[in-house]
Image: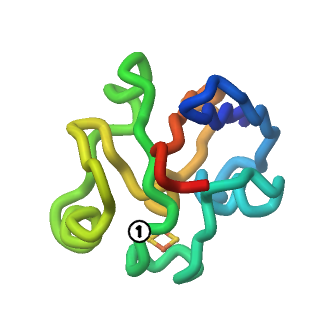
Amino acid sequence: TKVSFVEVTGTTYAVEADSGISAMEAAVRNNVPGIDGDCGGAAACATCHVYVDPAWLAKTGAAGEGMEKDMLEFAEDVRENSRLACQIKLTSELDGLVLRLPEKQH
Ligand code: FES
């Protein structure tokens, strides 16, 4: 599964990830700056906050009610398309996914 992480500056990190891992793990394994994944993917730190490219939002869905939404309240500049990358599971459906990194996170 290909995933692109795009910084505010336009710098793009295109990574190839195994299906089944989360977008956060894909970023951490490939040293994408700005995604720390401090809590290890438990939706408990918000250091993996990303914006889903609008074209992909229908496929990834919006942030889940409950833990993910609650934790996003601690993130800065949260938008409609904000997600915790650790809660996005990569599947072949999401091949080509584009995630944008928040300005503050790098
Ligand atoms: Fe901590 Fe996603 S890695 S909330």
Relative to 74, residue 34 above or below: above
Relative to 39, residue 54 above or below: above
Q: Nearer the viewer, residue 31 or 59?
A: 31
Q: Amino acid at mark 1?
A: Ala
Q: Quadrant of the N terminus?
A: top right
Q: Is residue 99 left or right of residue 59?
A: right
- Residue at the top extreme of this rendering: 55
The image quadrant that residue 37 belongs to is bottom right
Q: Quadrant of the C terminus?
A: bottom right
Q: Nearer the viewer, residue 44 or 90?
A: 44
Q: Any atom of ligand 1 within 8 Å of the CB at mark 1?
A: yes
State the image coordinates of residue 79 (x, y, percent, origin top left). Answer: 24, 41
State the image coordinates of residue 54 (x, y, percent, origin top left). Answer: 36, 21
Q: Nearer the viewer, residue 69 or 61?
A: 69
Q: Residue at x 67, y 35 (%)?
A: 3
Q: Is residue 43 left or right of residue 106?
A: left
The residue tagged with tag 1: helix, strand or loop? loop
Q: Residue at x 60, y 41 (%)?
A: 91
State the image coordinates of residue 72 (x, y, percent, origin top left). Answer: 27, 63
Relative to 103, residue 38 above or below: below
The image quadrant that residue 16 belongs to is top right
- Name the image colouring: rainbow
State the image coordinates of residue 56 (x, y, percent, origin top left). Answer: 43, 24
Q: Which residue is mark 1?
A: 46
How many residues crowd mark 1 within 10 Å: few (<14), some (14–19), many (20+)?
A: many
Q: Is residue 61 left or right of residue 27?
A: left
Q: Residue at x 71, y 54 (%)?
A: 33
